[in-house]
Amino acid sequence: MMTKVKALGVLLPYVKKEQHFHVATLKDKLKVWEAVCFLFPCLHPDDICGPNKHKWMTTPGHCTDVAFDRYCEDCGWPEALEDIAYHVWALYAKKDISDRQFYNARAACAGIDAGL
């Protein structure tokens, strides 16, 4: 069962660059992506703006962590998740992950149920 604390524990080492997402195993990448879907259930992978097309704004982080204090004004994605999202998009485009893994509705619904 995913919790906010557990999801942040999985995600933050990659966001803070303590671990490098591009060299993580596929299993670890999917755990990180599940944490993203849980913590940000209102974001949709199809909505992220293209690279260098964001209008960043600063707002209090919805996860109460300073790593998430800058968001794109247009798509709502946190700047800290941009690289992870693009990398997961690439995995999906290459068919390395399934629709169910990419559009992780189970994790998003669990995040909504948890009040996120």
Image (tube, rainbow, N blue to C red):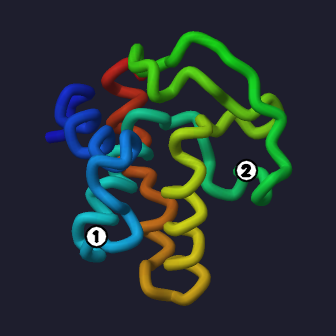
Q: Position of residue 90 (x, y in %)?
A: 57, 76
Which amino acid type is marked by label 1? Ala
Choose top left, top right, bottom left or bottom right for residue 86. bottom right
Write down the residue under mark 1: 24
For marks 2 and 1, give the CA distance.
Answer: 24 Å
Q: Is residue 30 above or below residue 13?
A: below
Residue located 51% across and 17% down the image: 61
**Which residue is most to the top?**
60
Image coords of residue 18 (percent x, y): 28, 48
Q: Callout 2: few (<14), some (14-19), or many (20+) C-alpha neighbours within 10 Å?
A: few
> Any mark on residue 91, and which?
none
| Residue 14 higher or lower than 40, as above or below | below
- The quadrant in which the N terminus is found is top left
- Identify the residue at image location x=79%, y=58%: 50
Cβ–Cβ below 8 Å for labels 2 and 1? no
Apparent side of residue 7 relative to residue 109 in the rendered image (left or right): left
Above or below, 48 relative to 67: below
Q: Circle 2 — which element?
A: helix
Closer to us: 21 or 100: 21
At 48% across and 66% down in the image, what residue appears? 102
Circle number at residue 47:
2
Q: Nearer the viewer, residue 21 or 10?
A: 21
Classify 100 as above or below 72: below
Q: Residue at x 85, y 50 (%)?
A: 53
Whole-percent x, y for residue 82 in the image: 59, 50
**x and y, in percent, of residue 17 in the image:** 36, 48
